[in-house]
Amino acid sequence: MIALEGINGGIIALIVVIVVVVIAAIAIISWWIRTSNRLKKEQIKIDEAASGIDVALTKRFDLLTKEVAVVKGYAKHESTTLANVISMRRPSSDASMKEKADFSAACTKAFDSINVVAEQYPDLKANTNFLNLQNQIAEVEEQLQASRRVYNSNVTVFNEDIVVFPSSLIAKHLRLVKRDFFEAEETKRQDVKIEF
């Protein structure tokens, strides 16, 4: 009788251990799947936000070329500035964020150059097409800023998740690497000089 109770106690203990191990394995596997899916969804959000930046950069470049066409008629001797704008190439959608940021900085520089040219031609500044383009450019700048904020926010969440334990284990297994931020243009990082 005592031997039978010892065997039953051992079997019950073994069953309890097996149940605990199975429950732990299920919990770990479900955590792994949830975390892996979350990281993949974060990557999709980053790609979507990057696409928003691409759309805004494309629209910005299109407006820049239209503005160049309007300015050409007024400023024939400003060919160097206009030729530089025309020669610009928009980066592809799979280009790095650094290349896109450099392109954005080049567009900003081109807009500034065109505005300097426009200052020399009062008729151009009063031209309705030019004014309309200026308004559209301001709207695109706002869209680009919003796209940058969304992109950088998504990158922050993703980068934090892939370096923080325990999700970093899954990130390493999936070979995920930190994403680059869309950095501010160098000219916009400089201090503003206010003169009176």
Image: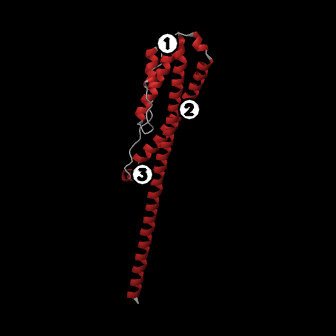
The mark nearer the N terminus, 1 or 3, is 1
Q: Position of residue 152 (x, y in %)?
A: 48, 37
Please name which of the two marks, 1 or 3, marks the residue nearer to the observer: 1
* Residue that numbered label 1 is attached to: 76
Q: Residue furthest bottom?
A: 1
Q: Secondary structure at mark 2?
A: helix
Residue 92 image-quadrant placement? top left
Residue under pointer 2: 143
Give the quarter of the image for residue 137: top right
On the image, which quarter does residue 91 sit in?
top left
Circle 3 residue = 167
Secondary structure at numbered mark 1: loop
- Marker disc for residue 37: none
What is the distance, in whole Å, between disc 3 and disc 2 at their CAs?
33 Å
Q: Position of residue 161 (x, y in %)?
A: 44, 47
Around disc 3, counting alpha carbons within 10 Å, would you say few (fewer than 14), some (14 to 19), or many (20 or more)?
A: some
Specify few, some or many for label 1: CA neighbours under 10 Å numbering under 14, 14-19, or 20 or more. few
